[in-house]
Every structure is written in C-alpha cells, then in structure tokens.
Image (tube, rainbow, N blue to C red):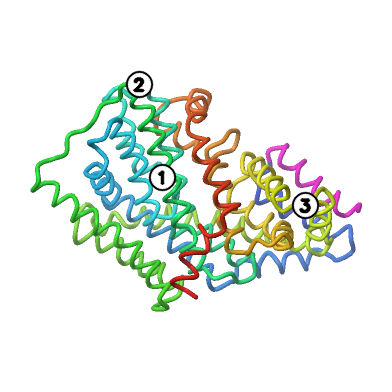
Amino acid sequence: MVESVLLLGSFLVLILLGVPIAFSLGISALLTAQYTGLGTGMIIQRVGSGMQSFPLLAIPLFILAGAIMAKGGVARRIVDFAYIIVGPFPGGLAMVNCIDSMFFGGVSGSAVADISSTGPIMIPMMVEKGYDREFATALTVASSVQGIIIPPSHNMVIYAMVAGGVSIGKLFLAGYIPGIIMGTLLAITCYILALKRGYPREKRPPLKKSLIILRDGLLSIFAAVIIVGGIAFGIFTATEASAVAVFYAAFLGLVIYREMKIVDLWPVFVDSVKTTAIVMLLIGCASGFAWMMTFLHIPTLVTRFFLSISENPFVILLLINFLLVFLGAIMDVAPLIVIVTPVLLPVVQAVGMNPVTFGIVLMVNMAIGLTTPPVGAGLFVGCTVGKTTMEKCTRSMLLLWPAMLIVLLLTTYVPWLTTALPNWLMP
C-alpha cells in the first residue's frame, strides 16, 4: 500500500511542480523501485525495452508522412475536395471544416497536424464569410481530433503494443465508423447553427475546375486506402504501411502537386525527429511506470474497486469514461495511453468489452481531452493558429462537445460500431 501511494503520489507532486510528464513518470518509478528494494536497474531496463518494439517503428514514419502531407499541399486539396461536397449547404464552409478533417485525419493520423495545416486555411476563410473567430477556431479544434480516431493513428499503434499485441489492422478498421459518425454529427451541428445564425452557402466552382479538384482530392485520400487496405488484406504490416505512406506523401508533394522541393524535406525531417524523440521518451518512461504499477498489483486493485461499486457493466463503463475524460483534460495522449491501458483493460474485459473496442473508446476519450482545458494540446494549437484566447474558444466548444460525447457513448455501448469492419475484412 505504501509503495502504491509513493508511486502515484510522487507522480502527482512532480506534475504539480511543473516537471515534464516524461520525467515525472520516470522519476516516480525509480523512487518507488528504490524504496521497494528492486533497484533502479529494473526500471531502466523497462524504459529501454518499452522503446525497442519493432512495430513502434511505424510511429516515426507515420509522423513523417503526416508532416510531408501537411507541407506538400495535401491539406489544401482536401479542403477544396470537401468544399465541392458540402459547400453549397447552409453553413457550408463550417461543414467543409468538419469533412476536410475527416479526410485529412485519414491520411495524416494527427490532430495537431490537421490544425496546423488546415487551420490557417479554414479559420481566415470562415471569419471573412461572417463566422465568429472563436467558433471557427473551436470547430477546427473539434473536427481535427478525428485524426486520432480515423486511421492511420500512431496512438493506436501505441495502444496495440501496450495492450499486448492487439491487431493494429483491426484497430485501424474499428476507428472508421466512430470517426465518420463524429464528423457527421459535427457537420449536422454546423448546419443547425447555420440556420439559426444565418451563415451563408458557398457556390460550387465550374464543372471543369470541380473535376480537377475531385481528382486531386482523391489522390490525397488514396493514401488512406493504401495504408489501411494494405494492412487489412495482409499485403504489408503496419510498419511497412507507414513506410509506404512516407513514399506516397513525398511522391504527391514532389512529383504530382510540385509544392515541395527536395530541400524542403530537411526541415520536415528535423521536426519529425523532434516529435518522435518526445513521443518515444514518453513511451519509454511510461512503460517503466506501467511496469511498476503492474508489479504493485495496482491493475488488480482497480478492477476490484470498480467491481465493488457495481456489477452492472453499463455503470462501470460510464465511470471509466468519466475517469478517462477527466484524465484526458490534464494529461497528454501518449503517456496516458501507456499508463491507463494496463490498469483499465482488465476491468473492461471483466465486464465483456473486447480490447479492440476499448482501444477505440480510449481514442475517443483522448480526442475529447485534446479539446478541453487546461492541457488539451489541440486547444492550445488551435488558439495560436486562430489568434484567440482559450477562454473564448472554450465557450464555443460547449456547442460542439455534445456531438463528441454522443460518439463516446455510442462507441462504448454499441460494440457493432467497432467490430463490424474488423470482423468483415479481417475475420
């Protein structure tokens, strides 16, 4: 009991003192290991082994692919593609923001990349057409989180490894229906607000230009077909798919769209390496922390705690979602996945939820966390891009959270949404 309090208590204290989360995880694990007599060598070994999984190679490659796509003109073409589809509806530009994030999330796998790429395009366009700056920013943030639900998502790769080898292909397929539902519900919300506030419709370009836009948009979206289709049909592994994604993104940017030059790749590589270093350090330290929790039987204690509250699966899953939404508001995505998965996966399995469904429930919770203060990374980036304050943006987020919470509840209590595609394509 003392060891568990030391592990969790020291972690919380370090976080409150402003210590970076990766170091907080590592230091608290080392302190607890030293106190229990295990010695620090075991934790250091676990930190190293946590980063030495071959499938984790997919993470830096997916990050690099997303960065190349953002730089190579893919974002703008997906915005134009969405414009053709939903622009003529009332509030069409807002709906474009929802749909382009659905498509861009399917090729970049990153909410922050989505905001950084489409935000500078969409937010000024919406403001110019009469939308509130805060609403335009909030919508950009809310729609961007489809990037961690709709594959390829490097966060799904992290979950698959921590959960003990869950099929990455099945996780990718499981994310499609919830991600599409979220984009659709956000678009419906925009439609309703457009009718109430009088937001304008947009004119579709002439036929010839529209066909060119559709062609370029489909070329961009085809990246998702290559990645997920290749994995689902056994053509290549997730790691190989991430490498294919890099080459395809570079081919689009350098050869097809010609918005990049070879020299433009160097800063993209540097930024991707920096991001990868941060993610891998978090994974390593969180792996050591998670191993320490397992050694102290904290997952077993948590399972007993939830089952002592109620034997009703509906109630237990609702409590878990409350917990994850709260944690998502105060912690970053990658370390939270590594920490909570070994703790909560036995609980949800005890009430009948399979690991693939829980993985998507976890992703939806993390998606909501990206939009909530005080630590939501998507909210921070969105406010910077949109040139507004977090307080103003959060007020507009209140209009969009209901759609996201509906998706969370549907994903939790309607397993078919996450099992239909995996069971059909990867039986």
Q: Nearer the viewer, mark 3 or mark 2?
A: 2
Mark 3 touching mark 2, by CB under 8 A?
no
Q: Secondary structure at mark 1?
A: helix
The residue identified by callout 1 is 183
The residue identified by callout 2 is 197
Relative image position of residue 158 (x, y in whole percent): 57, 62
Query: Identity of the amino acid at label 2?
Result: Arg
Q: Is residue 179 left or right of residue 88?
A: right
Question: Residue at 43% across / 61% down in the picture?
Answer: 62
* Residue 8 counted in the magenta span: yes
| Frontmost residue, 13 versus 298 | 298
Query: Identity of the amino acid at label 3?
Result: Ser
On the question of residue 289 being in view, the answer is no
Residue 40 lies in quadrant: bottom right
In the displayed structure, 17 sits above or below 274; it is: above
The residue identified by callout 3 is 28
Tag 2 or tag 1, which sits nearer the N-term? Answer: 1
Q: Which residues are magenta?
A: 1-18
Relative image position of residue 45 (x, y in whole percent): 72, 69
Label 1: how many Cα within 10 Å (few below 14, some 14–19, many 20+):
many
Residue 269 lies in quadrant: bottom left
Question: Residue at 64% across / 70% down in the picture?
Answer: 164
| Frontmost residue, 306 versus 74 | 306
Q: Nearer the viewer, mark 1 or mark 3?
A: 1
